[in-house]
Amino acid sequence: MEFRKMRRFKQQLSREECEEILNRNTSGVLAVLGDGGYPYAVPLSYLYHDGKIYFHCAKSGHKLDAIKKCGKASFCVTDQDAVAPREYTTYYRSVIVFGQASEVKDENEILSEIERLALKYAPYDSAENRSAEIREGLPAMSMIKIEIEHMTGKQAKGLAVK
């Protein structure tokens, strides 16, 4: 598939800038094809690692059902959203990725990425507590990854370097 080129290319962020945004933020919005052909978009916590987006979910539910039915997904992270009312504009910066979402089946990959997720969201917790939380939650969760096929980032004209 050929993805669209960004129309406002002067506002486009580099791949490195996109990756920095994905690494420093903690939430994004996943969009998949939901029930009845309706889009299903849901905010969630995530991990960007090794060029992939990872997140966990319950072993059953709308999100997982949609991904199993059609793996095509997009994921958007907003890095900045500052409304400037006097200027009738918004100073924004965001990244959107498109790719194939699938349930991770490899146990080593699941354990590795859930550990990374735990470190991202609870960096000061003890290794013992982190391990106990993972052991407790693992039986009820699925790990999903998005293999990124296309990534773009965009920022407001007022933030773009001229």
Image: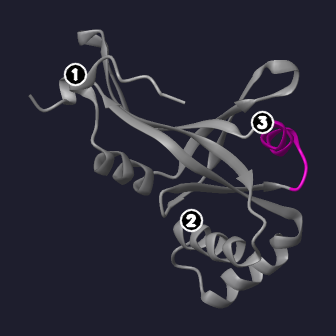
Closest to the observer, 128 or 30 = 30
Real-space CA distance between mark 3 and mark 2, rounded to the nearest whole angstrom: 29 Å
Q: Which residue is mark 2?
A: 121
Q: Mark 1 sits on what residue?
A: 157
> Is residue 50 positioned above or below 160 on the image?
below
Sequence-first disc among 3 and 2: 3
**Closer to the camera in the image, 70 or 44:** 70
At which x and y percent is residue 161?
A: 12, 32
**Marked residue nearer the N-terminal end (1 or 3):** 3
Q: Quadrant of the C terminus?
A: top left
Give coordinates of residue 83: x percent, y percent. Answer: 35, 22
> Which of the 4 image quarters holds residue 34?
top right
Q: Secondary structure at mark 1?
A: helix
Task: Kindly identify the residue that appears in the image at 71 percent across and 33 percent down.
Answer: 32
Q: Is residue 136 visible?
A: yes
Q: Amino acid at mark 1?
A: Lys
* Disc 3: which residue: 70
Front residue of this view, candidates 82 and 100: 100
Q: Which secondary structure, mark 2?
A: helix
Residue in view at x 67 percent, y 90 percent: 128
| Residue 31, placed above or below residue 117 | above
Query: Tag 3, which secondary structure?
Result: loop
